[in-house]
Image (cartoon, rainbow, N blue to C red):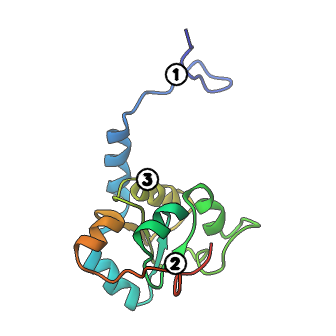
Amino acid sequence: MRKPFQHQGSDEVAARATIQDRLDQARQRIERFTPAEANTALTQGAVIVDTRCGDDRHREGFLSGAIHVPLSVLEWRCDPDSRDADGRLSDLERQIILVCNDGYSSSLAASALRDLGFRRVGDVIGGFRGWVDAGLPVRPDSEGAGPA
């Protein structure tokens, strides 16, 4: 039987949170955008970061003007103190809007960026699929989508 996780030097056991608890907490800390609002914000200088995997992007399409950053390296690309920071993303004052497939992992990731000091960070309600359902533009290829 596995023992509960204990912090080093402490007898305190970390309280268990469900994924729904974590999602609810994350969404209280971030901005949430409808797909139309996110599209408007893009035209006004916000950065949209597509965190979907390459297979999903190639199969379902690309968001024009979005920068692709895999979820697994997002914090390293955004943190201005990281040696792997992407200058397009590492301005703590810049509005960053994350998009994943359905709008769940992007909420958790946006909350993580809040922990790094980003104040204007959020995600797209419904994710990429919500974007498509709203009839917003999608490209069939990677032309116009920024590299990771």
Q: Which percent across, then down, holds residue 136? A: 29, 81
Describe the element under mark 3 as helix, strand or loop: helix
Asked if one can make out residue 31 in the rendered structure from this viewpoint, the answer is: no
Q: Nearer the viewer, mark 1 or mark 3?
A: 3
Residue indicated by mark 1: 13
Q: Nearer the viewer, residue 21 or 124?
A: 124
Q: Quick check: 109 left or right of 131?
A: right
Residue at 66% from the left image edge and 79% from the top image edge: 87
Give the amino acid type for the residue marked by disc 3 in the picture: Leu
Q: Which percent across, then down, holds residue 131? A: 30, 72
Give the amino acid type for the residue marked by disc 1 in the picture: Val
Q: Earlier in the sequence, mark 3 or mark 2?
A: 2
Is the residue marked by circle 1 packed among few (<14), some (14-19), or many (20+) residues within 10 Å? few
Is the residue marked by circle 3 packed among few (<14), some (14-19), or many (20+) residues within 10 Å? many
Rendered-image quadrant of the C terminus: bottom right
Residue 93: which disc?
2
Q: CA distance from mark 1 to mark 3?
A: 23 Å
Give the amino acid type for the residue marked by disc 2 in the picture: Glu
Q: CA distance from mark 1 to mark 2?
A: 36 Å
Q: Which percent across, then down, holds residue 55? A: 51, 61
Rendered-image quadrant of the N terminus: top right
Q: Nearer the viewer, mark 3 or mark 2?
A: 3
Residue at 57% from the left image edge and 62% from the top image edge: 70
Residue indicated by mark 3: 108
Q: Earlier in the sequence, mark 1 or mark 2?
A: 1
Q: Is residue 94 above or below residue 133?
A: below
Is the residue marked by circle 2 packed among few (<14), some (14-19), or many (20+) residues within 10 Å? few
